[in-house]
Image (cartoon, rainbow, N blue to C red):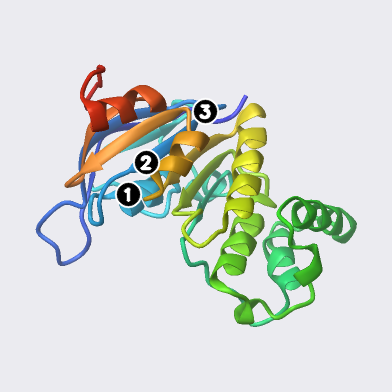
Amino acid sequence: MGYRLVLDKVSYKYPGQTQYAISDITIEFIPGIIYGVIGSNGAGKTTLLKITGLLYKPLKGKILLNGKDPWRNNIEHYRRRTVYVHEKPVMLRTTVYNNLLYPLKLREIPRGEAHKRIQSIAHTLGLSHILEEKAHKLSTGQKQLVGIARALLVDPDIIALDEPFSNLDFTKKKLVTSLLRKLSSKGKTIIVSSHDTLTIEKTSDQLIVLEKGKIICKGPTKETIKFLYEGNSSCSDN
């Protein structure tokens, strides 16, 4: 079934700031669809993803998950159904395997089941050969893959990925894209921000374009990109 996520006139600004990072955002995220989010630095991409990942509470407007406001209905329960993956995830100073095991231990997943999940995701993302290496000593791209794997291991319904392709080579980008496609086919709601327009075009079904904290364009990815670069197709705004 998945979770239908709705943002209704959502605005957020950081403490001490006068300007809103995102303003009056209204959009619906439907399970089984991959949403790309693009925009220049400071456009509000990261803030939007942290809002969808339930890390930030809107200062104005509201969020609904399957019709319920998670901030008024057991926020911790809903946070367990969502993940936000930072572009540069923080690694525990232990092995890659233990980094992957940690969120499963928090959720009291039996050790045998946890091991199966870790082996499966490691194989999928090409991490099997580094499971016993120290995670904090990995390359930036490897840390990025471990961060993605660690988030997906808990089987979330809403997955928000902040610049997941930025430090990956072409082969790894294809692996991540293929995995996201598989997850979306299972009813997951996936939201991906990126500066890599080519990869986001290949990855996403719907595209959201942010500028100065507002949605200036949204729609099917190919049509939206055509509108942005050629101006010869339609584009809906907020």
Amino acid type for the residue under numbered disc 3: Ile
- Name the spot of residue 19 as percent of width and height, x first: 11, 55
Tell me the quarter of the image containing the N terminus: top right
| Lower position in the chain sequence, tag 1 or tag 2 | 2
Question: From mark 2 to mark 3, how far is it between C-alphas?
Answer: 13 Å
Which residue ends up furthest to the left in the rendered image? 18
Tell me the quarter of the image containing the C terminus: top left
Q: Is residue 62 visible?
A: yes
- Name the spot of residue 65 as percent of width and height, x first: 46, 32
Q: SS at mark 1?
A: helix
Q: What residue is drawn where x is 45% and y is 48%?
A: 53
User: Quick check: marks 1 and 2 in contact, CB under 8 Å?
Assistant: yes
Q: SS at mark 2?
A: strand
The residue that disc 1 covers is: 45
The residue that disc 3 covers is: 33
Question: From mark 3 to mark 1, how far is it between C-alphas?
Answer: 18 Å
- 189 in relation to 55, above or below: above
The residue that disc 2 covers is: 37
Front-most of 177 and 153? Answer: 177
Q: Is residue 60 visible?
A: no
User: Quick check: marks 3 and 1 in contact, CB under 8 Å?
Assistant: no
- Circle 2 crowding by C-alpha within 10 Å: few under 14, some 14–19, many from 20: many
Front-most of 160 and 24? Answer: 160
Amino acid type for the residue under numbered disc 2: Val
- Name the spot of residue 226 as percent of width and height, x first: 31, 26
Q: What residue is drawn where x is 37% and y is 32%?
A: 207
Question: From mark 1 to mark 2, how far is it between C-alphas?
Answer: 7 Å
| Lower position in the chain sequence, tag 3 or tag 1 | 3
